[in-house]
Amino acid sequence: MVTGGRHRGGGEHDPLPGQRPEPGHSAPSPPPASGETGLPGLPGLPGPADPAGRAWARFGGVDGLGTHGVRRIAVITVGMALLMGVLVWLYGTSVTSLRPRDLPILTVGPAPAATALADQISRVEPGALTVRTVPTVAAADRALRERDAYAAIVIGGNGLTLRVASAASPAVTEALTRGIRVFMPGLEIPVVDVVANAPRDQAGGGLAAGYLPLTLVITAAGVLLARMVGSRVIRLAGLAALAVLSGFAGAVALQGALDVLPGEFLTTMAVVTLLALAVAGPVLGLGAVAGVPGLVAAVLVLVAGAALSAAASAPEMLPRPWGDIGQFAPPGAGATLLRSTAYFDGAGGGRPVLVLAGWFVVGLGLAVVGRPVRPQEGRIRIRVTSGPSVPARRGGIRA
């Protein structure tokens, strides 16, 4: 039963005819005319009392369209557009600008002939190749297996032979094979592959194509750990679990499903695990120390590092100094270490291990000293502003 007033859906109570409003009560506002809405003083905008108004307020209402909101939208959209352009250029130029730059190769044979051939090759395109001589084929093969050179041109009794290690870089092997035939047209130069790439991935594209999403997904997982897990201990435990599971899944995909990487399964798993620690660790650490700006910086470094990793070519094929810089980022060091352990018994993997371990230690240190993330951080705060509150009329409603 309703007494003392007429109950309306908005929660207000009008006085009965001839009854004065009680102190502290305001006279009822007339209902909005057709085509108007319930936000006082702002025709055409919904107020918080009706469903459309509640939806409008949920997205910030008029306050969300203020100068601060417009500025933030402008910074985000313009910044992301510029970033997209830079990354497209970076990834594109890592392919379109491929050519040898101080690429180490060997000449093999008697000293006078090997030296003369080395000088002749060096003058064809200055700066493209770094040529040195070794006396025997055994010495040349040892240099190929230790990743000290990409190829060797052998002077023998039957002419020239090109010895390569395609496992180091199929792209380099293809470029050198094509180049020597152009340099010496009309000669049949046999090619001997001392350290061959995986039969299922002779062009090297399978490993490169699988490696890129591997690093990017680990990066994204680090961001999720940094933003969704508040406890420092749980974040570190999550990092360890992520690294081990990523190592297992990566080894299964690269060796089992794709069959683009030979070698021991546990060794490959260990390399991918170390890579995951070196990628997700800094993301987690910078997120703990600097919040969202730290996460953005970490992701940018890793995405750019993936473009400069030379996973599909070789550091000596990228423009200077980007090839060298890429080897000091986790994606580049991880790609080099994977090839070293899978094909060359770890030769050439010392520096990549130090690089990956260094990134992990730095990330771990930042994650330890960084502040824990509070559960409410990162949530969207919504403020709904309405008109003055009207206390309910005492005794206005009786059951």
Image (spheres, helix red, strand yellow):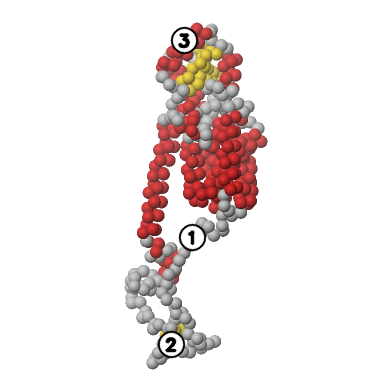
Query: Residue drawn 49% across and 34% down?
Result: 326
| 74 left or right of 138 in image | left
Distance in Å between CA atoms under marks 2 and 3: 110 Å
Q: Amino acid at mark 1?
A: Ile
Q: Which residue is mark 1?
A: 380
Q: Which residue is mark 2?
A: 22
Which quadrant holds the C terminus? bottom right
| 372 left or right of 60 in image | right
**Closest to the observer: 95 or 185?**
95
Determine which of the numbered discs, if any, sits on residue 116 in the image: 3
Up/down of 138 relative to 231, above or below: above
Q: Does dot 1 land on a helix, a strand or a loop?
A: loop
Could you tell me residue 134's position as x and y percent?
55, 13
Closer to us: mark 2 or mark 1? 2
Query: Residue drawn 50% across and 44% down?
Result: 298
Up/down of 49 relative to 174, above or below: below
Judge whether residue 55 can be spotted in this image.
no
First in sequence: mark 2 vs mark 3 = 2
Query: Residue drawn 44% across and 33% down?
Result: 94
